Image (cartoon, rainbow, N blue to C red):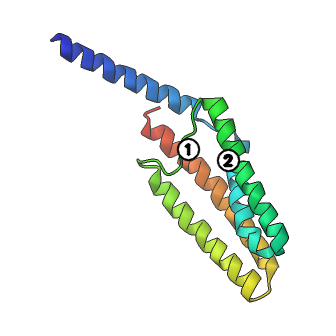
Amino acid sequence: MTMMQEEARLALAAKSAAEQDIARMSLCPPWRHAAFAGLMATLVALPAAPIPLRFGLLVLVFVAMGLIVRSDRRRLGVFINGYRRGKTRRVTFPMLVIVLLLYFASSYFALTRGLPAISLALAVAAFVVGYVGSTIWQRVFVRELGA
């Protein structure tokens, strides 16, 4: 084996080891999945709130997003974007479509039909979709890294 082949083999082994380390570190505690799901549920529930509260809740959603990113960076040293390339997109985009459909339905029922209670029920569904989707996303990500 030439020196170049040996260096390439060692580089690939180091890459594989780093990916497995990231996969092990990226296992999220249940509260992290619930935090993401809570954001999705809040967004779906927004149309049921009066306009001033709606804007306040939207600000809280953005603050919470920042706190989640900061928490991930402290825990992992990096924030892993849900829209990253790879097999995780097969989880991300269907989840996004479902949450958007729930949001549009929530908007319709709260703003057009005057039925905010339905928006809150849809928010519960969004929480379930967000939690389950987040856990599936994590499993796919860990599997993709080979851990």
Residue 46: mark: none
Query: Can you see residue 121?
Result: no
Crowd band around label 2 with a 10 angstrom C-alpha radius: few (<14), some (14–19), many (20+)? some
Residue depicted at 64% across the width and 72% down the height: 102
Q: Amino acid at mark 1?
A: Gln
**Direction left: furthest residue:** 2
Residue depicted at 74% across the width and 43% down the height: 31
Residue at the spot of label 2: 33
Mark 1 or mark 2: name the one nearer the start of the chain. Answer: 2
Q: Position of residue 9 (x, y in %)?
A: 27, 19
Crowd band around label 1 with a 10 angstrom C-alpha radius: few (<14), some (14–19), many (20+)? many
Rendered image quadrant of residue 2: top left
Give the SS element for disc 1: helix
Residue at the spot of label 1: 138
Rendered image quadrant of residue 103: bottom right
Query: Can you see residue 106?
Result: yes
**Label pair 1/2, CB-CB below 8 angstroms:** yes
